[in-house]
Structure formats: structure tokens, C-alpha cells
């Protein structure tokens, strides 16, 4: 069928003998020197809101009144597909609807000219750019849209001012009082302020030129440009043409892989300026002139001495608290640092940010693209420079709050801007602590040979001051060793052991491990001896001290004693509060993926959070462990059993009841009980209320 029979209902009829010939008026009008523009898009026709329930692209014939515009050779392209429109000539001021032929019924009630296409690439919800080209492939008009601009879909996007460009700034969402194909007098133009002069002014702001990596920069222009001019614009850096990618109609990404700009040494402030030129581009308003955008870029260092001051991982919609996840950093370097190109776990800032010397800077989740989120249950984040080097890192946990009631309350965590300083609840006392050993572990291969020593400290690796480590074997000189972080364990490091050093850690001789932080004294962490292979009957692990009725619900703890004669491997240790537990009712206290060794006559205290169950006990020792999973202990009467992996029998089981009565000076609330013998009958209140890991080890 001839395409003109599909184009319009406006036709003239001529009598030639007995034959009626249908000829469109567009045939008898002379083509004019106007321009076709895209007046409307409907990328997502669901849900039904009153507009046609089908995708379409509306074209408007702009020009002098009384003329017509031809569609001969006109092309539409989007999502990598191109469609050629059939020829015809349309009156200026006419709207022509282009749609899929299978959707013709959706437009039956609309008195509008139509062009139906046999095949139709989808106008995807995620956003794309529609190009209108002439027969030579030259771009006549462009209209982009984004997923966010669809407002959930279902509503056509109209060109607000038909004389202005098709950029997002000149787009309005259809409403029931408007025609769905545009132009509409009800749609007010917002493009009038986006002139070339405004564009040039906004492009000059320093914070709109963002480094995204070595040889990669993002230029945020501040005001939309005509997408048609952006299609042909070039960018030059010191005369060299670079590759451009328009991220939106007001920002672009420039790449020049052969023109790498290296970071500065810490003593320098500014690199030499880079002469940058973009153009020609024009503003979105009608009649905007083509102009060149000029800029001189100063390259600032992207690394220095950065410390984390604050983190908020559980915001609340409450007037007393912040409503958005955030991190606060401070720059302790004597020079400004450019944070624009940093990767925050894959997220990048939307705007350029400078960290001035000794000034705190707050970063909100809304400042970023692809913000990964700060899990309320705790986590880690590493901030890296474009070259992949670590700039700063932080870890956080509900256990960093001062007590259980503050965890999940929406209160931020804060710390001093110093290494070795610890988190506290906002407003609480922050402090700098010395690195202490909570526990150590021994990694072995299938032959039982020691391949690494796991060090579990009281300071997260993200906040530990730069350190040196060494082995001091019983005989011979000290051996320097470089540790690695253990993933998922922010308090843990792994020291590799070479095959020739494996014998240093044989029980009972052992080897001393020492640490030195930032030029201080060498601090011995202890003599490390790895467990030998022994018979199960030789193992002895028992609960030596228990606090089951704590003042604070997070203050319960259980202290385990190695009552045997050889070191014990506790990796995979689990516990249950059930008298007759199912397999699923055993809860892990130590992840089996990590090694924890308990030496003979040594203790290790377990609880929900180490800060919570040591609060109020100034004599607490360092051998403390946060249980992976913790079930509250019953205050009146209870049952508790522990088990090591690979053994069918419980390592120990204890019970308590209201019959446990102490002396006159004793109070049942917040008082630990100590075990006097091997049976449950040997319990008595500790003389000083108790202290986790305060009586042994």
C-alpha cells in the first residue's frame, strides 16, 4: 500500500472520468525551508493515565506559515537502530505522529497525521536519545530523556518551547489539559534563562570541572546545552582533541589516555594550568549563539593525611537526628586535597570537593552517584584515588556505640582525628588507645605446617597507625614481616610465615611477635605457640566466669579457660542456651574461617560486644572476643553449653538457678559468678562484681 494513504485525513478529490484519485494536500504544496523538530516522546505507555497506550515520537513542522516540509529521506534513530520515514510534504504547524503500525488502534480517536512503521525498536524506560536526521545523515534535532525524567513512566514528555532545543530543561510532563503530541500553549517554557551567556557563566565555576581519574575529567556546565550542538562539539586540552561522552545535556566526560596527568608530591600545592576548550556549543534558548567554552584547570593533589571523624550508618527521619547517611573527614595535610576523583566503594561525588587543611568536611549520601550504603549491621569502606591507592578507610559496627541502647538509635559515631583513636557515640568520650592483642591464631596447610599467624587486635585496621611488625624467634635475629588485612575481620591482620620459619612457632618454644607504630617503641604482643596434634581426651575447655544478670542487656559475658596442657584451636566454637538443642540452635561464637588459639591456663571472654560487656569493669583484660552470634542469657535460671567443631560431645555445660545465693554484700543484678570447681555446685559471686579476662591470663 502506498504510504501516503496512511499519512493524513486531509485530502483533495479530483474527477478523472469515472476514477476517483485520492491525493494528499501535501502533494500540491511546495516544500519550504523550515525544520522538523521532535515535539513529544512517549517511552513508557503504562500505566494508563489518559494518553495513548502506545509508544510514539511526535514531529512538528516548524517554518513560515503557508509552506510545507518534506519527510523525504527523513530518519529517526535511537538505541542503535534507525528507521527511514516515507516521503510526503506537511503544512508548517502540523504535528506528525510516528508509531508502530501494530499500535494503530491506540491512535484511532486522535485527529492527527500519522506515519506507521512496520518495526519499532522500544523506547526503553532506562533512557535514551532520539535523533532526527536528514537524508544525508546530518542531525536536525535531538531529544534525550532519562529514567528519572519519566517520573515512573506512563506520561508523555513534551517539548515545552517549540522554538528552543530538545534538552531536558525544555521538557515538560504531559497533563490531562494538554495535547499529548505538543506543542501546547499550556506548557510554559523554562528554557529562556538558559542562554549562551548563562551557559558561559556557569561553566566557569571551578567546582564544575571534576577530575575522574588520570586523563579523565568531567565538565558539569551548570546549564543545559542544545543537544544538537553537543553532537558536533569538540573538546581540546592544550590543543589536543579528546574523546567526549555526554552524560547528560549539561555534563560530559572527557578522556585523553595519551595525555596522563600525574599526581603531585605532598609538598606541592598546584600543578601547572591545563588549557581546556570546548565548542562550539549553544544554549537551549531560541536564538542562542554558538560559543566556545574556555577554562584553565589547576590540578590539585588527590592524596594526603586524611582521618575519619564521623560516620552515620543508621539515620532516622527525626528532627533530633540527621536523615541521611554521612561520613565526615578531615585533612591533616598542609595543602588542599581534591576529593572529586575518589572512589568510595565504587561511588563518586557529583560535584568537585576540596578538603582544606585542618578543616572537617561532611559527605552526604546524596552527594554521590552509586552510593553503596552504610549497613546498619556494620561494614567497611575503602576510599581510593584514581590510581587505586588507598586514601582513607573506615569500619563501623553497632558495637562501636557506648552501650546497647544507642545502637540503631540514629546517633552518629565520632572519633578524634588521630590514629589509634576509637569510635564513641556522638557526645561520648573519644580516646586514643594502644594496640593490644585480643587473641592470635595459627594458619596451617594440609600437612599441618604453619603458614601464617592471625593477629586479632583491639583497634580496627582502618584506624591503626602505620606499623612495623617482626618475629623474634628463641634464637637468632629478629625478622621483619609485612602483614595483610583479613577480609571481613576489621580487627585482624595476617602475618605470613615462610616455610623456613614454621618451626619457630612449634609448641612449646614459640616466637614473640612485636609491633611498632609511627616511630614509637617496639611493643611485644606475646609469645605465640601453635597447637600440636593431640588426642581429643587431652582437651580441656571450661566456662570459668559468667555474668548472666547484667545491668545493661548487652553486658553479659562468658569467660573460657583452657584448663588443659596444650594450646587449643577455637575456630568454629559454638554455643547454645537450649537444654536439648537442635543442630540449628547452636550459634557460632568464632567463625570457622578464622583461627583463634587459646594457650594453657589462659582465658578469653565472650559477649555480644566487647565495649558493652567491659563497661564498668576498669580491670578488664585485653583478651576479649565479640561473639559472631549471641543469645541473651536468662537472668533467673539458665543452661549454657559450648562445643568445638568435629566433636560430638559438648566441651562444657553449665546451669544456674534462683538457688544460687551469695553473701550479704552481694547483689544479684550486674554481678558475675566464678567457678570454684569442675561441677555446677562450685559457683560463687566474684568478690569485686567480676571483670571479663581480669582474673587470669
Image (tube, rainbow, N blue to C red):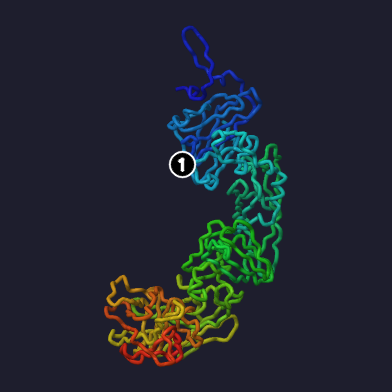
Residue that protrudes farthest toward the top in the picture: 17
Residue named by callout 1: 47
Q: Is residue 479 visible?
A: no
Pick the front one: 241 or 459: 459
Left or right of 253: which side holds 295?
Answer: right
- The residue shown at (64%, 61%) is 353
Q: Position of residue 494 (x, y in %)?
A: 46, 76
Q: Which image quadrant: the N terminus?
A: top left
Q: Residues within 10 Å of mark 1 (few under 14, many from 20)?
A: few
The residue located at (65%, 44%) in the rendering is: 225
Q: Position of residue 597 (x, y in %)?
A: 40, 82
Q: Is residue 516 visible?
A: yes
Please determine whether, in this image, residue 312 is positioned above or below residue 162: below
Quarter of the image where the C terminus is located: bottom left
Corner quadrant of residue 647: bottom left
Horizontal side of residue 193 vs 368, given as left or right: right
Amino acid at each position: 500500500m502506498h504510504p501516503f494513504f496512511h499519512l493524513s485525513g486531509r485530502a483533495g478529490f479530483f474527477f478523472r472520468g469515472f476514477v476517483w484519485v485520492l491525493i494528499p494536500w501535501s502533494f500540491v504544496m511546495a516544500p519550504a525551508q523550515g525544520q522538523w523538530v521532535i515535539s513529544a516522546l512517549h517511552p513508557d505507555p503504562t500505566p494508563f493515565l489518559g494518553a495513548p497506550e502506545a509508544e510514539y515520537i511526535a514531529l512538528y513542522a516548524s517554518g513560515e506559515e503557508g509552506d510545507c516540509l518534506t519527510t523525504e529521506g527523513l530518519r529517526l534513530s535511537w538505541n542503535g537502530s534507525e528507521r527511514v520515514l516515507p516521503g510526503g510534504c506537511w503544512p508548517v504547524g502540523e504535528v506528525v505522529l510516528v508509531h508502530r503500525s501494530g499500535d494503530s488502534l491506540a491512535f484511532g480517536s486522535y485527529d492527527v497525521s500519522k506515519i506507521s512503521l512496520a518495526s519499532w525498536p522500544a523506547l526503553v524506560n532506562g533512557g535514551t536519545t532520539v535523533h532526527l536526521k536528514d537524508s544525508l545523515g546530518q542531525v536536525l534535532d535531538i531529544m534525550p530523556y532519562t529514567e528519572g525524567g519519566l517520573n515512573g513512566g506512563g506520561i508523555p514528555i513534551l517539548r515545552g518551547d517549540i522554538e528552543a532545543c530538545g534538552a531536558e530543561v525544555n521538557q515538560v510532563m504531559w497533563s490531562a489539559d494538554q495535547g499529548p503530541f505538543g506543542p501546547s500553549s499550556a506548557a510554559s517554557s523554562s528554557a529562556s534563562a538558559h542562554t549562551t551567556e548563562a551557559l558561559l557563566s556557569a561553566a566557569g565555576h571551578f567546582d564544575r570541572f571534576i577530575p575522574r581519574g588520570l586523563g579523565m575529567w568531567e565538565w558539569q556546565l551548570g546549564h543545559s546545552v542544545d543537544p544538537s550542538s553537543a553532537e558536533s562539539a569538540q573538546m581540546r586540552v592544550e590543543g589536543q582533541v579528546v574523546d567526549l561522552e555526554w552524560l547528560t545535556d549539561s555534563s560530559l566526560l572527557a578522556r585523553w589516555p595519551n595525555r596522563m596527568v600525574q599526581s603531585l608530591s605532598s609538598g606541592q600545592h598546584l600543578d601547572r594550568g591545563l588549557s581546556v576548550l570546548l565548542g562550539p556549543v549553544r544554549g537551549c534558548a531560541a536564538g542562542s549563539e554558538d560559543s566556545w567554552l574556555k577554562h584553565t584547570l589547576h590540578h590539585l593533589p588527590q592524596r594526603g593525611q586524611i582521618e575519619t571523624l564521623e560516620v552515620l550508618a543508621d539515620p532516622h527521619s527525626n528532627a533530633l537526628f540527621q536523615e541521611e547517611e554521612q561520613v565526615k573527614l578531615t585533612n591533616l595535610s598542609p595543602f588542599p586535597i581534591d576529593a572529586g576523583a575518589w572512589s568510595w566503594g565504587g561511588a563518586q561525588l557529583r560535584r568537585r570537593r576540596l578538603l582544606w587543611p585542618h578543616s572537617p568536611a561532611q559527605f552526604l549520601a546524596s552527594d554521590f552517584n552509586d552510593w553503596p550504603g552504610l549497613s546498619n549491621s556494620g561494614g567497611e569502606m575503602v576510599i581510593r584515588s584514581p590510581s587505586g591507592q588507598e586514601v582513607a578507610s573506615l569500619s563501623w559496627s553497632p558495637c562501636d556505640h557506648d552501650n546497647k541502647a544507642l545502637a540503631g538509635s540514629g546517633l552518629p559515631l565520632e572519633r578524634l582525628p588521630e590514629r589509634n583513636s576509637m569510635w564513641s557515640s556522638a557526645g561520648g568520650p573519644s580516646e586514643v588507645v594502644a594496640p593490644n592483642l585480643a587473641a592470635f591464631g595459627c594458619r596451617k596447610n594440609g600437612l599441618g605446617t604453619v603458614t601464617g599467624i592471625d593477629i586479632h587486635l583491639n583497634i580496627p585496621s582502618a584506624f591503626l597507625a602505620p606499623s612495623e611488625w617482626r618475629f623474634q624467634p628463641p634464637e637468632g635475629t629478629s625478622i621483619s614481616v609485612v602483614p595483610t588485612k583479613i577480609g571481613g575481620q576489621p580487627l585482624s591482620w595476617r602475618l605470613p610465615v615462610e616455610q623456613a620459619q614454621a618451626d619457630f612457632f612449634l609448641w612449646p618454644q614459640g616466637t614473640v611477635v612485636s609491633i611498632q607504630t609511627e616511630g614509637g617503641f617496639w611493643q611485644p604482643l606475646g609469645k605465640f605457640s601453635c597447637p600440636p596434634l593431640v588426642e581429643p581426651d587431652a582437651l580441656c575447655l571450661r566456662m570459668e566466669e559468667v555474668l548472666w544478670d547484667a545491668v545493661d542487656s548487652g553486658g553479659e559475658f562468658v569467660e573460657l579457660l583452657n584448663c588443659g596442657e596444650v594450646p587449643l584451636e577455637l575456630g568454629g566454637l559454638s554455643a547454645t542456651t537450649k537444654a536439648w538443642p537442635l543442630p540449628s540452635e547452636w550459634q557460632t561464637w568464632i567463625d570457622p574461617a578464622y583461627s583463634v588459639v587459646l594457650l594453657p591456663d589462659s582465658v578469653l571472654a565472650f559477649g555480644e560486644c566487647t565495649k558493652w560487656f567491659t563497661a564498668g569493669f576498669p580491670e578488664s583484660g585485653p583478651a576479649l572476643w565479640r561473639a559472631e552470634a549471641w543469645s541473651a542469657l536468662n537472668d533467673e535460671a539458665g543452661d549454657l553449653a559450648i562445643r568445638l567443631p568435629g566433636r560430638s560431645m559438648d566441651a562444657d555445660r553449665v546451669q544456674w538457678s534462683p538457688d544460687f545465693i551469695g553473701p550479704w554484700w552481694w547483689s544479684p543484678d550486674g554481678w558475675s559468678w566464678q567457678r570454684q570447681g569442675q561441677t555446677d555446685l562450685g559457683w560463687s559471686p566474684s568478690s569485686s562484681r567480676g571483670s571479663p579476662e581480669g582474673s587470669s591470663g
